[in-house]
Amino acid sequence: MLKPILITLVGVLLINISYAQKKDSAVYYLNKKGAVVASKNDADYSMVFLQPDSAVDKTLYIIKGYYKNGALKLVGYSKTNNLNLKFQGRVTVFFPDGHKMRIMNYENGEMIGDITEFYPNGMFYNRETISKLSTGEEKTLLMDCSDSNGKVLAKGGKGTWLKLNGELTKVTEEGPIVNGVEEGDWHSRKSDSVETVTEYKNGKIISVADVYKSGKKVYSYLEKAPAFPGGQEGFGKFIGSNIKYPAKAKENNVQGKVTVSFIVERDGSPSEIKVVKGIGSGCDEEAVRVMKLSPKWEPGIHNSEAVPVILSVPINFALGKKNN
């Protein structure tokens, strides 16, 4: 999918503006977040606004961005001459070494049409197409994709697609596309021992699961999630009737939420219960103790079969007024 554009400019306060020597241009110094900074030395890049070229379009200001070392970062046109940019036409983004990173097309400040990206070595990476639906919503189609050696992986919306990190240097996920959208199983590496498999159907996520070296597959998203007997109300009653406020937490007036994760196995029993965010003073241990008392849940269902699913729940510790 299209990576986030490397600059964030909309809505930035127009302060601390430094003007270039030429009267028909202005320079803005910005940090990585797109916020204006006081001087060139504090900036990660700069944006230069030039007056329209009447030979091209007298209504469009010329926009150029530069890396801290002076290398060209971006070039394009805008209908506005300040950081509330309204790009029009082609905008090209460059890697620090001068290779093209991304070519985009805009209409009245909105990205539209083809977006083409390149690897740092200059080779073609992918082409996506954005169109406007009659409802006003945007639709993005994945069209063409190649690896960094130039091997064609997808053509005309069909084949294998690679998703890269923001620097376009590392594959983060890959999988098949059909008719320009994700289809089937997409794979990404969570760690050396865990792979994440995301299942798509017509571009929509159907399930997400972690696959361990042992072969165990644990879902974090699927068609039918596990449910506690009696639903959320039943779970609240179970916690309320079993929780015991730790004495140390009462003494220290410790209150808050303990987040506990666990796996609902195929038979509905909770396993691998652990605290992922605690508040201490005995509350973490108490949350785990109570969860170990939990009755079996209704298991998660995927493709009409019960599957292990990982869940996380918050358990609230709050003292009444008489304890404050």
Image: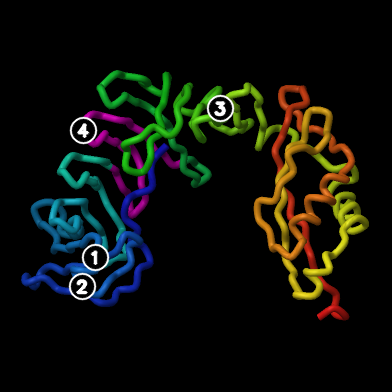
The reply to whether callout 3 and callout 2 are in contact (CB within 8 Å) is no
- Residue at 77% from the left image edge and 61% from the top image edge: 283
Question: In the image, 49: left or right of 253?
Answer: left
Label 3 to label 2: alpha-carbon separation: 49 Å
- Tell me which numbered mark, 3 or 2, is placed earlier along the sequence: 2
Residue 187 place in picture, x, y as percent: 50, 27
Q: Nearer the viewer, mark 3 or mark 2?
A: 2
Q: Residue tagged by mark 3?
A: 202
Q: Which residue is mark 2?
A: 39
Q: Residue furthest front?
A: 248
Residue sitting at x 73%, y 30%: 308
Quarter containing the N terminus: top left
Spatial separation of the CA atoms under disc 2 and disc 1: 7 Å
In which quarter of the view is residue 317 placed?
Answer: bottom right
- Give neighbour class at mark 2: few <14, some 14-19, many 20+ (Cα, 10 Å): some
**Which of the two marks, 3 or 1, is nearer to us in this view?**
1
Q: Are marks 2 and 1 in contact (CB under 8 Å)?
A: yes
Q: Is residue 291 above or below residue 244?
A: above
Provide the secondary structure element on which disc 2 rests. loop
Percent position of residue 183, x then y:
53, 24
Query: The magenta stretch spans which residues?
Result: 104-132
Neighbours of disc 4 within 10 Å: few (<14), some (14-19), many (20+) = some
The residue to which callout 4 is attached is 121
The outermost residue toward the left is 22
Q: Is residue 111 magenta?
A: yes
Badge 1: how crowded within 10 Å, few (<14), some, or many (20+)? some
Q: In the rendered structure, which amino acid carries the disc numbered 4? A: Asn
Residue assigned mark 1:
43
Q: Main secondary structure of the magenta part?
A: strand
Most foreground residue, 324 or 50: 324
